[in-house]
Structures are given as C-alpha cells and as structure tokens.
Amino acid sequence: MKLADKIILLRKKNGYSQEELADLLDVSRQSVSKWESAQSIPDLKKILKMSFIFGVSTDYLLKDELGEDELLGDEIVKTDNDYKVKYVSMQEASDFLGKSLKSAKEISFAVMLCILSPVTLIFLKGLMEMNVLKMSEDRAGAFGVMILIAIVAISVGIIIKNTMKMKEYDYLENDSIETEYGVDGMAKDRKREYLEIHTRSLIIGVGLCIASVIPIMCSIIVFGKESEFTIFAVCILLIMISIGVKAIVDTSIVWDSIIKLLEEDEYTRSNKAYRRNSIMGIYWCIVIAIYLCYSFVSNDWRMSWIIWPVAGVLSAVVSQVEKMIKKKA
C-alpha cells in the first residue's frame, strides 16, 4: 500500500478534510492534494507529524509492504484527536526559554512588590504609636494607602506586560506539541543543568516564608505582645515573605518553561485535555483583601500577621483540591 493511499485512508478514518489536515500540518491544501495523488512526497518532518496526528508509526507510513491490515491491527498507537497539534522548531524553543527567563525576573519582582505594598502603611502606623511621627492618623493612613495603590498599580502593569508578551506561547501549555529533532535533547540538558538552581531557590524561598514568623515571636518575647515593636516586626515578616516568594516564583516560571517543552508533570498531553485556568491568583487577591480589611477594621496589626502563614498552608490545600477537580472534569 503506497504512502498516498495511506494518507487518504487515515485522513478519512480520522474525519479530516484536506483543508483541516493541511491546517494541522501547517501546509496548503494543494500540498495535501499532491501527496494524495502521488505527485509529490511529504518531507520527513511532515511524515513525523502525520504519524502523531494519525496515531500510527512512521514505519507504517513509509513501508509499502504494510497495508490496511496492519492499520486495523494493534500497530496503531491510539491518540486523542481532540488535541491540537503544534509543531515547535528549535528556534521557537530557544526564543521561548530566553523570553521565559527574562519574564520570570520581572514577574517575580512584581509579585514581591505586591507583598511589600502594605509595608509603608504599617511602618507609618508603628511610628505614630511610638509618637515619632507628628502627623494625624488620617493623613498617615491616606499617605500609606496612596503608596500601596501606586505599588500595586505598577506591579499589575508589569505582570500584564509580561503576560501579553508570553501570550504567543500559550499553546505550549494548552495544546499537544511535536518538537523538531534536537529540541527534546536540548530541553533535557537545560533541565539537568537547572535542577540544582531550582532546588536551591525553592529551599531558600520556602525557608524564608517559614522563618518569617521569627521576628514576630522575638518581638513578643522581648518586648511583649502589646509593644509597638511588634508592628515593625510585621514589616520584617512581609519583607522576608516577599523575598522568599520572589525566589519561588522566579525559579518556578523558568522550571515550568522547560517542563512545557518536555510535556512532563502538569503539562502532559492527558492533563492538557482538561486544563482549566488556575484560581490561585484569585485566592491570593482574596487573602490580601482579608488581611487589609481585618487589620484596618480591628486595628490589630500585631496579630493580623497570622493570616499569611495560615494562607500559605491553605494555598497548598486549595491547589490540590483544584487539581482533583480538574482530573474529575
């Protein structure tokens, strides 16, 4: 059975028109028509891509002695035709990794700024309670909120800019991919080289988040629960958390970019079939809102810090529940 006949058979078996198959292969309809009429032969890249789309081996496509009987047997590899198949060249993969590295630094910095945004407000509150700052409470509060809003606005702008810049690579997260020869090996080399940095960054980030409660505890032990110094300890807590989260976000974005090319962990083809948008961004916005509302209403800045470690623990629970829901969907 010739290649031209196999292409016709497999295309019809999978319910594709010539136009639809051409779109999946990134070629013109005329090219598919010429292949099926044996006027031309697809190159090796297109044959590899067809083997993935149709779920057959390249041997089946290339060897004339393998015919329809083999197709109807066990040789065919079943795939989910609901997947969109995107071909990734070496140049695209290199550009993606380079842009991800730069984007990781900017996004992690923006997240750090968001966590630091209440520090000015809390610091001014502490100075007022110590009678160091000669300013009315309303003015100090207004100034602190103004700084908070400005920092959040800048941070959101940075995140939006980088999100839009990486939008062209969304298919790596949502669609099945077929990579050019050498891309898989390059990604595995990057993964092996970056593993130590990734592990170290996670240890530092998680360690800082856990240790961030130490200044609060020290302040309570040395100066007492009602001391004004506890307010400044909250500032130190937020600074430590911001540095830790920055390290985690930075390394996670870089690591995920490598994993996306390899289609591992969260980005396997089966997971992509029912991927949904994460709710963790909304979760942390709610946590910040609860923290600020409770602190302002109760004026209990000394104890409201407990919201952050509790939210950190709950975030892991929320993330796991989200994954379970996705798997059942």
Image (spheres, rainbow, N blue to C red):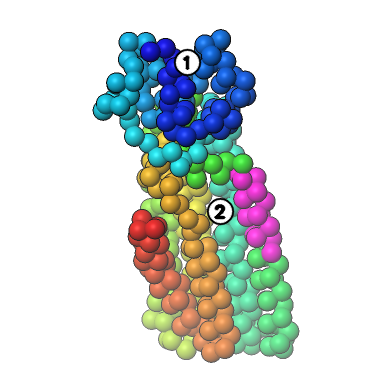
Q: Is residue 214 above or below residue 67?
A: below
**Residue 203 point in image, percent of width and height:** 38, 53
**Mark 1 to mark 2 CA distance (whole Å):** 52 Å
The residue where tag 1 is placed is 4
Residue at figure coordinates x 38%, y 81% from the top left: 221
Secondary element at image label 2? helix
For the question of whether residue 207 can be seen, the reply is no
Inspect the magenta stretch and tell me whether residue 69 lies in it: no
Which mark is in front, 1 or 2? 1
Residue at figure coordinates x 42%, y 36% from the top left: 262
What residue range appears in magenta?
Answer: 153-167
**Residue 147 point in image, percent of width and height:** 69, 71
Dominant secondary structure (helix, strand or loop) of the stretch shown in magenta: helix
Secondary element at image label 1? helix
**Residue 259 point in image, percent of width and height:** 43, 40
Mark 2 Cα-neighbour bin, 10 Å: few <14, some 14–19, many ≥20: many
**What amino acid is found at the position of numbered circle 1 in the picture?**
Ala
Which mark is drawn over residue 108?
2
Which quarter of the rendering shows the N terminus?
top left
Residue at figure coordinates x 53%, y 66% from the top left: 282
**What amino acid is found at the position of numbered circle 2 in the picture?**
Ser
Position of 168 with respect to 4 (left or right) is right
